[in-house]
Structure formats: C-alpha cells, structure tokens
Amino acid sequence: MRARSSGMKQRNDDALLPVGGAASAPWRSAGELPRSPESGSERVDHLIVLGLVPHGARVLDIGCGDGTLLALLRDRRSVDGRGIELSREGVNACLARGLSVIQGDADTDLANYPDDAFDVVVLSQTIQATRNPRIVLEHLLRIGRQVVISFPNFGHWRVRAELAFRGRMPVTEILPEAWYETPNIHHCTIRDFVGLCREVGARIERATALDARGHEMRFSLPWWVWNLIGAQGVFLLRRGR
Amino acid sequence: MDTPLDLVAPSGPAESLAPDEARRGLFEPAQAHDPTSPVARFDARTPLAMDAGVSLAPFQIAYQTAGTLNADRSNAVLICHALTGDQHFAHTHPVTGKPGWWERLVGPGKPVDTDRYFVICSNVVGSCMGSTGPASIDPATGRPYGLGFPLVTIRDMVRAQAMLLDKLGIPDLFLCIGGSMGGMQVLQWASLFPERVFSAMPIATGARHSAQNIAFHEVGRQAIMADPAWAEGRYLEAGTRPAKGLGVARMGAHITYLSEPALHRKFGRRFQGGSAPTFSFNADFQIESYLRHQGLSFVERFDANAYLYLTRAMDYFDLAEDHGGVLANAFRGTRTRFCVISFTSDWLFPTADSRAIVHALNAAAAPVAFVEVESDKGHDAFLLEEPAMFSAARGFIDAAARARGL
C-alpha cells in the first residue's frame, strides 16, 4: 500500500469511487483485502470512508499505517487530517507525505484530545486490540462528531465452528494469528458491539456487515443473521442515543 | 552537549584538571568580544527588552550562515543551539578546531539542505562565543559584567534572534529547529512569533525544565561557585579561571547527556591503561578518564559565568506557566507545522516531556507530527548519527518545503 504512484494523480478522481456514488451506497463494500478494480492500489474501505467524509472536514485516523487513507482524504477531500500510528516506520512514511501523524496508540493518546476536535474519527480493525475498548470508544465519541469503526466479528459462523467442532481457537482470514501471538485481546461479536454502543450511549447511524471477502451484505437482515455470517462489522456512530 | 560521546575517544594517560595559574587552554574573553563569525550590533536605539526588566544596550549577536537567501526571502532556517553550543553549526570551531556541531543534519544534500535553504544560527544572548553575555564588557563600568549581567531567559534569547532576523531582512522562518535548550527556543519562537514560524522541529526537549534537571544544574553551579578561583564572579579581572569548578560541572552534566547502556557499551568497567586497580584515586577507569577529558576540554572554550546564566535560563523555562498554566494556550490558533522528536534513552528530556508538548499541540488543533526514535545514546542522540531521526527530519522538512512552494 506504500507505493501510491505518482500516476494516481493523473486519474479522474471520481472514476475510483464505488459504482453508484459514495453518497448513495457508502457501505457497498469494505474490508482489508479488496482493491478497487480501476486502480489496483487502493483499498475499497478507504474509498468508502472517502465517500463519507465531507470536503474540508477534520479527520483523525487512528492506526493510520503509512498514511494511505489520510493522503487520499487530503488529496480528494481537502481534509485537515491527523493520524496516530504505533510503528515508527509508519510515522516516517506519513511524515514524508506531509501528514501530521504522531507515534502513539489508542489506549494512551486519545484522552488528550479535546471534545469535538474532529468531524470524523476512523478506527479500522483496531478496537479489539486495545486494552480498554469501552474507554477507547467513549473517547472516539467524545472527540469526533462521527465515528467510523470496523472490527472482526467473533460471532462469524466459521469462528463458532472452529470452537464448537474442533475445540480450537479460530484462525481465519480475518483473524490469521494463533491465540498465543494475536494482538487481538478483546474479541467481540457484532451483537456484543451493539450492546457496547447502547451502554456508552452511542447512536448507530448506520451499520453493516461484510462477508469474508470484504463485500457488503446488502440485503436487509436481522442482527442475528449478520452476527452469524458477517466476517466484519462496520459502524457509523454518533454521540447520543 | 556539543562534544558527543562518539567523537571523543577516551584520552591516553590519566589527566588531572589544569591548575588555575596556567591559563593556557582556558577560556579567553577575546572570543566573547570579537568572534570569528559575523556580528550584528544593536545600539541604544534598539535595546533588548529582557524579562528581568532590563533594557540591554548596546548588545551584539554573533551568528553564522550557510546557503543563500532566495529572492522571496522565504527559505530561511533558524537553528537554535543547545546549552553549551554556539553559532558554528556547520563551520570549523575557532577554539577547538572541530567540525560544525550539526554537520550530520545540516549541509549540502542533508535533511536541512544548505543547497536549498538559507540557514542561520546565532550564539544566544548570555553565552560567550561573541554574543553579549557576562564575559562582555559592561559599558557603564568598563569591566566585564560578571554577575552584574541581567538574568537571561529563553524568551530573551528568542527576542534577540528576532531582532537579528529583522536586521538581516528576513520576515519569517521556513523552519525553526533545535535540540535540548535549542528546542526550548523553538517552542518559544512558535509561541511568541507564530506568524514568523512556518514549521518547527523541537527535538529532545521539554516545555519546562523538570525538578530533576534543575537539581543537576544547581549541582553544576555550586561546583563553579565553590571554586575559589571563581572570585565571586570577578575571575576575569582577577586573572583566574574557575576551571576546576566548571570542569566538575561539565563532568556531572555530561553524564546526564548519555545513558547507562551507552556508557556501558563505550567504557564498561574497563581500566585505563592497565588491567587492575592502582589503589589510588587516579583515573583507573576509562569512564573517569573520559569525563576528566570532557571537563578539561570544556574549560578551554566556555565561560563559567555564562554557564551559570544559561543553566538558569533553562531552569526558568516553563511555557505553560507563562500561559495560565495551560500549555495548549501557548499555541492557541497557531498555523505552524510541528514535528516533535524524542529519543527512547533520553532521561534528561524523556519522551514524556515531548508527549506533553504533542498533547498540548493537539489540544490547540495544531498540525503536529511526533516520532520517538529508538536509540541507546541518551540525550546527546540529537547530535549524533541517528538515521531514524534524519529520515523523519527529511520527510517532514521536504513536505513542509512543498507546502511552502520551495
């Protein structure tokens, strides 16, 4: 993902947006693996966030990696973007892109941001690796007017099957590490997360589940079905019920 | 702070501090009046308004430059030097003959690229390398100021630098960068003249001096004042130099610039010139010899009173206190781009100090980047070969240059 070539700039911006336009279907698909077919170099979930974030917004990307999403948001949406990244390599890559990224993590650094500091806060595939997910979520809701959060669903049928039939901690595409080396210390299911949202007073503005290939499950389904067949949950949250 | 560990090998046989009578190899006040670098002179019409309530005039600021100012006057970089540093950042030192103290970072093709930027570094007011300080002659008495010099603050240093820039016709800085006490000046610049600082890199520094750091400084000052040759600060007239006191102060301070792992790697418990203790108080251990050498070489080039004044300036620095106790208020509304850097083994200005700066800048909605560089070299790492720092600096500075259209 690091090599976002200079050729990118010459392409028409809109050509990379999901078919149908971001506004009409911002959750079309997301996930770690898929790339938009046109570019081959951009993650579909990044393009979804891109479709969601208004022009000129203030955005905080927690766990921003090499800054791909922030650079995309800056170049296409003129956002005032900030990032938090654990690895020095990631921070250095961000610096070279002219991004304002601090070396830190969600558990320790969010407390220092003032209320309503950002229009949108993004936390991708990270909350399950934090020491205190509830406090992290509360900070996200406090410092961002909107929160985009995604996480692996531990209620997915394959996870359940591994436990039920093999009696083993699951190792899947979305949870590739063995139990003794995974950074994911606070697994939850989609239903668990909905419960946490209720507890901390988060309003779920939109929610969806993605299948194992990162494609959105587009038909309307009851929670329990999503909780069974969704590999990832993706939520758009806002403070207040 | 400007004689990095890697540059000085432990010297040969054990050395003892030079006796005061032999003034050879001791600080000469001439370098305080008449440096080898350019000097900007300010007369009674343009005094320096100091925090101590004094209008200092006349005064002078010695400086060095590298590179060329562009037609837009938009490519100026100000380097702020550390406690015992000076303006010779990329020039051979006139006293020690050593290369410039930041040539690793600054020069043609370096992260602070003198092919692209006009780089300035001035000796801070209160120091002794050509800018007015306690070794300068007080025009009112015709004698060296000594302790008659007003107490200096970091803000005074920055005000004097701003006056120098005015004199050089430089409206604002593309980059203000410095480590340790230099980093304090960078923070002060960004707070005092936000519209004159496009980007800022405070390195291995803090927004205030900690109690522990004040304590170390006080030990150094007491060592100087306990030396009879200090003569209540009038040693220049008495023809003596408090070399022992200043040397001890430097030895103590130098330990704080390093780290236990670095000392262990470099010296361990190795003996100097033998394999067994001599059952004496000679410098048996290499580390002892090294520290004595540091103390000895320091007194050649530095004025003891200037050391008192500059350590005091660092002690007094508390940027939050100047802004109602809230550090974020020091940067309210700033548009300066910040890149804060700390080092894992720096226990003089630990990463927590840098994080406090970053958190305040976040609270002030300032664009801020922060990198903690993995290093076992302690505080002095900012002066040494640290590729991770260089790559971070290069990334930040290049991006800032693009943003400024340089």
Image (cartoon, coloured by chain):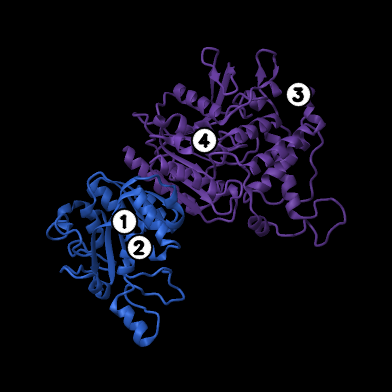
Residue at point 54% right, 20% down?
B48
Sequence-earlier tag: 4 or 3: 3
Q: Secondary structure at mark 4?
A: loop
Chain bearing tag 2 is A
Q: Colour of chain B?
A: purple
Tell me if label 4 and label 3 are in contact, CB under 8 Å.
no
Q: Nearer the viewer, residue B5 or B246?
A: B246
Tag 4 residue: B325
Can residue B104 be seen here? The reply is: no
Residue at point 45% right, 35% down?
B329
Q: Which chain is blue?
A: A
> Marks 4/2: CA distance?
37 Å
Question: Quadrant of the rendered structure where residue B112 is?
Answer: top left
Tag 1 residue: A202
What percent of the width, then of the height, locates residue B30?
Answer: 67, 25
Same chain, marks 2 and 1? yes
Label 2 crowding class (10 Å Cα cut-off): few <14, some 14-19, many 20+? some
What percent of the width, then of the height, locates residue A219?
Answer: 15, 69
Tell me if label 2 and label 1 are in contact, CB under 8 Å.
yes
Tag 3 residue: B234
User: Is B36 displayed left or right of A52 in the figure?
Assistant: right
Chain bearing tag 3 is B
Q: Quadrant of the N terminus of chain A?
A: bottom left
- Mark 1 belongs to which amino acid? Ala
Count of numbered circles on the image? 4
> Marks 4/1: CA distance?
34 Å
Residue that sits furthest to the bottom in the current view: A165
Tag 2 residue: A196
